[in-house]
Image (cartoon, rainbow, N blue to C red):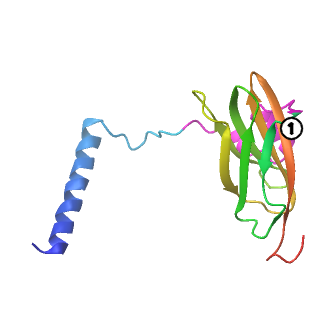
Amino acid sequence: MDQLRRTFLKNAGIAGAAIAAIGTGLLRPVEVLAATWNKLAFTSTNVADAMRNSNYNGATESKDILVKTPDIAENGASVPVEVISNIPATTSIAIFVEKNQTPLIADFDLSNGAEPYISTRIKMSQTSLVRIAVRAGGKVYTQAKEVKVTIGGCGG
């Protein structure tokens, strides 16, 4: 059997199955399966508003939040961030970059006793504090670390 014909028949079968699933209501293309988006928090233009709009206001400093970032990031488009919360009953972790145009980078909800550990890459427009906010046991905690963003690795 010709490989092109085989590929065509395979793809036609997949398309037919998808159309049948949509027709029977098993698959709804307009339904989003993601969590709701806090537009107000993610579009806030300063860190105080972003923290308030995402319910992290009134946070107290905590040494139990470990923030691992490079001291100097040579590429602000991809800065690695690792967060570990040693605070018992941690239910969410948020990342803010204070000098970004929109400071709230991410807000992670942890459920069912998930380990309070986040590892991701973020975008930073300039040298700034990376602020981590943690919600645990009905209280809010924070920790920050400065990251210097260089242009091509030539200064900060």
Q: Is residue 141 left or right of residue 3?
A: right
Residue 14: image quadrant is: bottom left
Relative to 133, say whether 7 is above or below.
below
Front position in the image: 27 or 95: 95
Q: Residues within 10 Å of mark 1 (few under 14, many from 20)?
A: few
The residue that appears at 80% across and 29% down in the rendered structure is 140
Count of marks placed on residues: 1
Q: Position of residue 24 (x, y in %)?
A: 25, 36
Query: Is 138 within the magenta?
Result: no
Q: Position of residue 51 (x, y in %)?
A: 80, 37
The quarter of the image holding the C terminus is bottom right
Answer yes or no: is residue 67 visible.
yes
Front position in the image: 31 or 75: 75
Q: Amino acid at mark 1?
A: Lys
Query: Is 45 within the magenta?
Result: yes
The quarter of the image holding the N terminus is bottom left
Q: Is residue 120 left or right of residue 152?
A: left
Element under disc 1: loop
Front position in the image: 21 or 98: 98
Identify the magenta region. 35-60
What residue does disc 1 label?
A: 63
Q: Position of residue 87 (x, y in %)?
A: 76, 30
Answer yes or no: is residue 38 visible.
no
The residue that appears at 71% across and 50% down in the rendered structure is 82
Residue at far left of view: 1
Q: Position of residue 132 (x, y in %)?
A: 79, 43
